[in-house]
Every structure is written in C-alpha cells, then in structure tokens.
Amino acid sequence: MARVRHHVNLEGLRKSAEDGCELCVLIHSQAEALLAELESPKGKRLECSPPDFDTWVSQRPDGGQGFWVWSAPMSNTSGGEILPVAAFAFIVTEDHPLSASIRGRPVVPNIDTHQLDLLLQWDAECEQHHQWCQNNGPMPRRLIDVQSSHSGRHVKIVDLDAEARHRYLALSYATNAALVDRWENKILAADEHVDVRALPKLFQDAIFVTRALRIQYLWIDSLCFPRTAAELTRDSEQFGSVYENAHLTLSATGSEATADGLLLPRPARSLAQVPYAAPGNSAEQVSVCTLPLARDAIREYYIDMARQPITSGVWSFQDRVLSRKTVHFASDQMYFEFDALPDGTEYYRKRAEEDTPSSRWFAILWDYGKRQSGSGSGKLAALANVAAAYQRMNKDEYIAGHWKQSLLESLCWQSLSCRPSGERGVPSWSWASVDGIPAMGFTSSVAHSFPATILDTRVTLVDDAKPLGDVLAAEISLEAPLVRLKLIETTGVGVDDHMFLRAADDEDDERGMYAGFDSIDRRFSQSAHVVRNMPLFAVPVACTRRENCEAGSCHVGMTLRILLVTPVDDVGNRMKRVGYTVSASERLEYEKSDLRRPFVLV
C-alpha cells in the first residue's frame, strides 16, 4: 500500500493546525482523542505503546473513498510496524461536479426529504443490480394506506385481498414478544381512519418516510392487528413473512422508545476542504470528515451496530435477518443494507468459517448471542422465524436451538463471557441457557472421530403449533465415556488465577485442562470452593485434528472436545452441562471400556 509522508511528529502537526490547515486540525483532534483513550483505564489495560506521530497517509483499504493516517509506536524497534491512528472519508453534496464518482454525502443534523431522495437513489440502484431485491411475495392482509388523505393528516387501515401484490414498507423497532404496547391499547378496524398527529413520534416518522419514498402501504405491528388475532406474537409465522416480503424495512436502529421517533437528530461533524482530482478531471474542492477508526479498520463493526438500542434485544434480530433490504436510521447516520437472499442468511454465509449450513448457523448464533432476552423467556421463540427460513434451506430437524445433523458438533459450544439466561425449560446443553456468545464450530479443524454417540432426543414444546419455539424441557440420551475430574489445588495456575481440572486418578498431571465453565466464575479465588465440592465429569464428544493435517503428520496432535457435566440427582444417570473445554487427546485416558456408559443430558 502506497503511503505519503505527512508530519514527522506531533508538534509539527499541532503547529500546522494552529497555522490554519483545516485537515491538520481534524488529524490533530483525532490524535488527541487517541492519546486520551490510551491514558484511560481501559487503554492502559491494552498495554499499547503510544504512536510517535511520524505520520503517513494512504488510501482507505477495501476500496473506501478517503484515507488513513498511520504512525509507528514509540517502542517499535523493528522499523516495520505501522498502525492506523485516524480514518477519513471524502464527501460531496448531491449537486457537486464529482457526485457521480464520490459516494459519500454529508451527514446533516436533521433528516428531510432531500436526504430521503438519496435513499430513493440507493433503492433504485439496488433493484437495478440485484434481481432478488424485486419481491412479489404475499403481503400482510392488513396494512396502513399512507396515501388515503389529500391533506396528509390521516391514514387508513385497510384489508387487502389475499391475491393482492403491492409494494409495502415494514417498520422494525425495539419491542417485546407480546406487543403489549399497542397504540391506545386497542385493535383498529379495517377502513378506520387514524389521525397521524395522535400516533407516537416513531409511527409519524415512518409514515413520513413511506410517503417520501412514494410507497402507498406501510406495516406497523401494533396498528395492523386483525381483530381475530388479539394474541398474535412476534414468533408467529405471519411476522416472519412480513419482513421477508417487504419491499424495504425501516429500522429504528437508534431509537430507544417510540417517543424518540425515527428521524433522530445526528451530531454535527467537523469537515475540512481538500483538493481532489478524479481521473480525467481537473481538481475540485471536496470535503473530508472523520470516521470511527475501529469501525473502519474492522468493517464488521459497522454491520454489528453494537451500540445502537435496537441491537440489544432479541426480538428485532429476525426483522433484520429476514429483510431483503433495510434502511437503518441510526444515531449517527443512515445505513442502507441489502446484502441478503430470499433465505435471509447470505450475510452469515460470508461470516461463516466454511460455506456449510452448520457454519452459517453458528455465525447467526454468534451475533444473536450478543442480545439479551430481558424477560427470562423467549430466546428460542425470538429466533423461530430465522430457524424456519434456515429449515427451508437445510431440511433438518430442530432441537432446542440445535440441528440434528450437526448436533454433536454444536453441543461443543464455548461460553464467551456468559451468564445464566434464566430461560425456563431450556436444557443446560442449549446455547439458549446463557446470555452471551456461544462460540461454535471446529474452526480450522475437522472431526476425526466422535467418542460420544446420540441414542435419542426428546423435546417437549410450550406450544405444539410452534415446533421451532420455546421448550418446556429437552434431553439427549448419549452413550459416551464419563471421566471423573478433580480441581487442581494450585492457586495461580495459568493466567489470571484461572482454575484447571485433571482426571481424578491422574495425580501426575500438574497442568490439567482449562476449567471453561459456562457461567461459574472461572477464577480459583472466586469459585474453587464450589468446584471442589462438585461431582464433575468430562464427556469427550469429538476428537478433531487440523484441516489438511493427517494424524501423526503435524506437530499438533489430536484435540478432544469435552463437555463438563455434573449429576442432577443421586442416581447419577442424568447430567447437566456446566461447561466446555479442550484437551490434547493423550492427556485424558477416555478409551477404557469401563468408562463408557449411557446417560441423559438435560
């Protein structure tokens, strides 16, 4: 990547900013912010050396229009390491001579019809280049006709013919399962006129956007209930099809409540003017604005939108995954998302380690695991429509959040900063038993053998009409080795006082296996007294080796994927999962015939 020298130190950058260089003012402000972050408690924990601000400039990676500013850290002695310290984008107005070649547009504090014209342009380009964006699927029977009033003061609730095919928009916002916050706590009748001014700000804004996009119909959950569906919930099949078949989903990504509205005021951005010469054109002045460096360096951060209110709860997840196109009205700007397929999982195909159905599902759960159910129930229900779309693709049997064909592999999920979810009826072996990321998949490895065998599975549903929803109970009958474990009684073993386990009959094993508990604090000082008195067993589920590495040909041998379980009663033939770990296969003597027996995992 070609780089151009900018300033040799921070003092030179500061002086240039003081002398009136607009670009240097922006870069210097980013430098000061970075130094302040490194001095914060969080920054000090990273143990990063501050940059020396001998700065260089290069083009943004991955085709981004703009540039990065780079610097070497002060402690660097190799002369080769250089790190980004600031990111910038080129932006122009719609009437600028370079608007056809520069995609970025200014983020104005308040959205109006001029900004929505840009959304119209995005939508038209999407339909022109992506045939799957053109949807002719069934519509919801009840919609809001936003064009029914000449004055614009009213909208009308309409019931459409089952065969009708019109474009409509759908609103997605932070909400709950039962939709208890219905507007004025009533169900509206067909052909009923509604005063727009009486609606929550969010709904008013959604109507305004729908009109600006020249679409006649809008779907909002709490306004579009038929009288015969008073108990309709968001895990019903009808809700999934609403988002799958919408022309575009309006996502209130930055709104915490309906009173916030959709068109949130955005913080003003500082700009600098720089000359820009496009190929075949004379130089023109264009604007430069700062970008969040972490998100520009790790593009998935843009997609995750982790700090936006809508991404904290589970119920809006299906709206985003199933929608073909979504415009996110976030707290900082608008985002147009259209990388999807009719099965609703194209983004997760790209995120997956491999392009296989199971890897794609594991990628879905990684994102879904970051969200909180909040009510102590509904984590499986909130994913039901996504699971239904996935099932249409893989034709597999669904078992409490897992798929039968990949059940042994998916049982080997690793808890990343998890805590109990409080989900009633969810089995201990399901990822839905915790709030947090369930890291799944044998990354860069392939299964060599499965010491565990599934004998049977049993699931009791909360509602038999919803086979992909919440469960009252679920269990797996297994036959596998059960190796008794013991806590290694050495404080401070490993990093951060973590606990380690060994086979109870192996007194010579001083290193052991990492105690990867799902929700028990893994520090010796905090939980040793709990683990010491817990009957604990290792269940080797799978034995893996590195991909393209035959057994015995690599310096790394076989790896055991192990569930940590404990009996739920005195009989000892019913076990619950409490954690997961990995170990070199030679560390655990699990192949003795007397260790293998049937038991039930609950």
Image (spheres, rainbow, N blue to C red):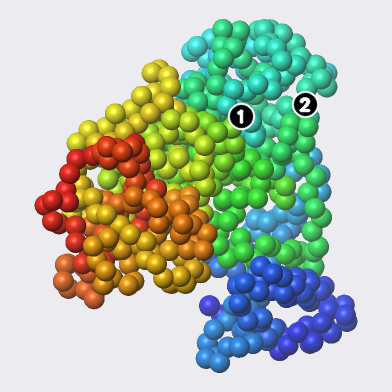
- In depth, the one of 186 and 151 nearer the eye is 186
Crowding near the residue tagged with mark 2, few <14, some 14–19, many ≥20 C-alpha atoms within 10 Å:
some
Left or right of residue 449, residue 358 in this image: right
In which quadrant of the rendered view does residue 459 lie? Answer: top left
Left or right of residue 473, residue 223 in this image: right
Q: Where 190 falls versus 351 (above or below)? A: above
**Would you say residue 79 is visible in this rendering?**
yes
Provide the residue designation for mark 1.
Answer: 176
**Would you say residue 355 is visible in this rendering?**
no
Left or right of residue 513, residue 268 in this image: right
Residue at the image position 81 percent from the left and 74 percent from the top: 25
Q: Where 285 falls versus 324 (above or below)? A: below
- In depth, the one of 180 and 585 nearer the eye is 585
Provide the secondary structure element on which disc 2 rests. loop
- In depth, the one of 11 and 123 nearer the eye is 11
Give the mark nearer the N terminus: 2 vs 1. Answer: 1
In which quadrant of the rendered view does residue 69 lie? Answer: bottom right
Which image quarter is the C terminus in?
top left
Crowding near the residue tagged with mark 1, few <14, some 14–19, many ≥20 C-alpha atoms within 10 Å:
some
Residue 84: where, in percent of width, then height? 62, 74
Amino acid type shown at disc 1: Asn
- Looking at the rendered structure, which numbered label has been put on residue 200? 2
Residue 456: where, in percent of width, then height? 22, 33
Residue at the image position 29 percent from the left and 48 percent from the top: 409
